[in-house]
Every structure is written in structure tokens, then in C-alpha cells.
Amino acid sequence: MKVLVINAGSSSLKYQLLNMENEAVMASGIVERIGDKLGVLTHKKMNGTGEEKTVIEQAIPDHKVGMHLVIDLITHKEKGVISDKSEINAIGHRVVQGGESFNTSILIDASVKKAIKDNNPLAPLHNPANLMGIDVAEELFPGTPNVAVFDTEFHQTMPAKAFLYALPYEYYTDLRIRRYGFHGTSHKYVAKRAANLLGKNPEDVNIITVHLGNGCSMAAVKKGKCVDTSMGMTPLAGVMMGTRSGDFDPAIISYLVEHKGVKVEDLDDVFNKKSGLKGICGMNDMRDIHSKAEQGDEMAKLAVDMFVYRVKKYIGSYAAVLGTLDMVVFTAGIGENDDIVRKGVCEDMTSLGIDIDTEKNKGRFSKPQPIHKEGSKVQVWIVPTNEELQIAQDTVNTLK
Ligand code: ADP
């Protein structure tokens, strides 16, 4: 079975074609700057030994034109991997916000599209773009089933005490204000994979999953089910991120408006794009920040310290939530590659049973790797995430 995974953004469209017989990626790519004067499509065809890259630069006025280009490439005589688009058996769509309407992936029909649209106010930048991807796929692949896989669905198992904010209750009932959590496919994938690596069923282990990329989130996963997660109603909450603040005192908002004259309509920008690592040291790429810190830049050092400290605090609180903790799992760009951050987060945590081996921790990992000392009560692992594979697996399972 061949599954095309689509992740449509407002001006981009990421795709990956997988052969689910062996879960191998056949081709992948991204269409960017849709709607700009000059768009760009970067396509990668996998062959036995590596990948062949093709870059096309031309005006790509909308997602439909972009998808047409993708179809032309994946069915191309030399650059392609299939001979006709009808060989694609199903399409899996990443949809950011499923709200409370979806606690599992679902075959898309008109009522599902309506429910996704009803959630647009909760994710105004993402859901309309995801819907656009679905419309284009329906048009260009008539008769092929489309499945929606939600970023939020894994977190729908949280109990009310974890997902409710301590605000007037009618904000929840009338406006659906609550914690939803994001990066669900990543947390689901690594939690399941981590349990398998221990030779256990997910139902038999308690795990804290630590997804540290540009966006960062953590989840407390009890016996295979998410019981708490750090992102909130939007992906702004929780730990500190590249350009997003993470948690802060909400009273700061009115203080800023009153004392700094920040306009209400600019606040989103401040907290989402000018905060986090960038807000502290002016940079948001952790590699750049480390190299500045090595040169003695005090603000870069402070940014790393703050980042590490916040992840550490969440580990402590999720260990308390889980009662017993079996594993801590690091994933995504920083989680998989940054030994300084991992060491900082895990050091001096033996009281929680976390004892990492600084030698094993050294380096970057593209395969699962344990980094705890022998005898550490809690196992600490790096498990590279694979959100596209999780979406493809959920697509196949939904169609079963
Ligand atoms: P996204 O959330 O966009 O998917 P990624 O998971 O790719 O992001 O993570 C991006 C982050 O990972 C960036 O902050 C980047 O600096 C960091 N990163 C990638 N490689 C390394 C590395 N070798 N060392 C430290 N950080 C890294």
C-alpha cells in the first residue's frame, strides 16, 4: 500500500510518499513560497543508496498548482517513483487542530471537513491551510481515500483536571478554551517506539516524552495514554522555544499594553516570534547559540540555561504526575542532536532516578540510543521522531 502524506501550510506544502509494505520513504519534498512571485519546489527521490534532489523554481500561484508539480515529479519517467498517481492508495493529511471533535484519525467526508472548519477559530493559521490541502487532494486524486490525522488527537486522553484552565468555567463551555496540546503524532510515535525498545507494551510503561525542535513540547504518557502535555490551547504555552515564550504570567499582557504601549494586535507576534531563545539572545537556532556561548557570549549562555531549566522543571512535575517513571525520551532537532541540552536537563536528577551517562550522551543520533548509566532507575533514550510515518500508519489503520 502506498500512502501520500500531506502537510499543507498557508504558503507551503510538505509531502512524503511511503511504501507501507516496508514503511520506506519513496519520495519527499516541500513546495514553498506558494503565492509569491517565485515559488520553489524541492523534491527528493530516494534510491537504494541515497537521495536525488530536484529543485524547481517558478511561480506557484496556489496549492493546486503546487500539487500538480508534485504529481508530475513523482510520476516522472526518471525522477519519479511511480508511473501513475492512481498507484497511491491513500492520502494522510496532517491537521493541526481537531478540538474535542476528534480523538482519533478519521476518513474524510463532508461532515469531517465541516468539523475541521468549525475548529478554524482555534487554529486560524493552520486549519484553513490544512483544509486547502484536503480540497486539492480530493480534486486531484478522485476516488482515493483521504484521512485526517490530528496533532491534538493523542492528547485527547488528558483528564479534565489537566486540560482545564482555572478560568471561569463558561470560557471552556462557551468558547472551548482549554489545553489541547500539539505535536501529538510525534509524542505518540516516540512513546510507542520507546516502549517497544524496552520490549514492553506501551500499556506497561510510564514515559515523559521531550520534543525539542523549533517548537518544543513535553508529554506525560501513562500506560500508553497522554495524561498531560505542556502546550496549551495554542502551541505558545509550555517550555521555552526558539521564538515562542512558553509559560509566563498572563498579567504581563495588560502591563505591556499599559506601560509599553504594545498594541493588542501585536501581542501575538511578540510572544510567538520575538520571544523564547530569540527574545533573550537574539538567535533562535540552538547551534548558533552554542557557538556564541562558546565564544563567551553571556546572553547566549543565559538563553541555554533558561531553556534547560524549564525542560527540567517540566520533567520534575511530570514525574510527580506519573507517580512512577520508567523512561525519559528526547526527540526532534535539539532532542536528537544536542548533548549539551540533554546533559543540562538530566544532571542532578538522581533523586528522581534519572542518571545519565555523559559519555553515551555525547553526539548526535539518527537511531534510537539509550544514554542512561547502567543501574539508572529511569531509562533515558533518544528516539528520533517520525511524524510522517506515524501519519501514514494512522492512515492505514483508519482505512482498516
Ligand atoms: P521543527 O520544529 O521546525 O521541526 P526541528 O525538529 O528540525 O524543528 O529542530 C530545529 C532545532 O534543532 C533548531 O533549534 C536547531 O538549531 C536544532 N538543531 C538541529 N541540529 C542540531 C545540532 N546538531 N545541535 C544542536 N541543535 C540542533
Image (cartoon, rainbow, N blue to C red):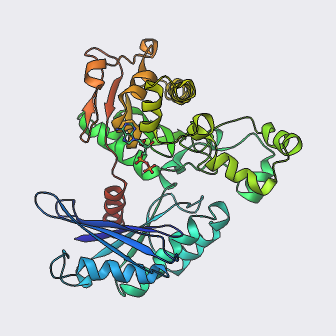
Query: Is 284 drawn above or below residue 363 in the view shown?
Result: below
Residue 173 drawn above or below residue 71? above
The quarter in which the C terminus is drawn is: bottom left
Give x and y (percent) for residue 378: 36, 22
Residue extending furthest toward the front? 295
Coordinates of residue 117 in the picture (x, y in percent): 61, 72
Whether 198 is drawn above or below 253: the answer is above
Looking at the picture, tell me which residue is in the foreground, 354 or 154.
Answer: 354
The tally of labels here is 0
Q: Is residue 217 visible?
A: yes
Q: Residue at x 25, y 33 (%)?
A: 369
Provide residue 176's location: percent of width, then percent of height. Answer: 70, 56
Does 120 sit left or right of 132 as displayed? right
Q: Is residue 290 left or right of residue 91?
A: right
57 up-or-down from 190: above or below: below
Specify the quadrant that holds the N terminus. Answer: bottom left
What x and y, as percent, mark residue 367? 23, 40
- Give ligand 1's quarter of the image: top left
Side (left or right) of 48 relative to 12: left
16 left or right of 182 in image? left
Residue 400 visible in image: no
Residue positioned 34% across, 58% down in the render: 388
Q: Quadrant of residue 142?
A: bottom left
Query: Residue at 56% across / 25% down in the picture?
Result: 302
Question: Residue at coordinates 52% horizontally, 77% vertically from top-left?
Answer: 35
> Going by the picture, which residue comes out furthest to the left?
48
Depth check: 177 or 347 in front? 347
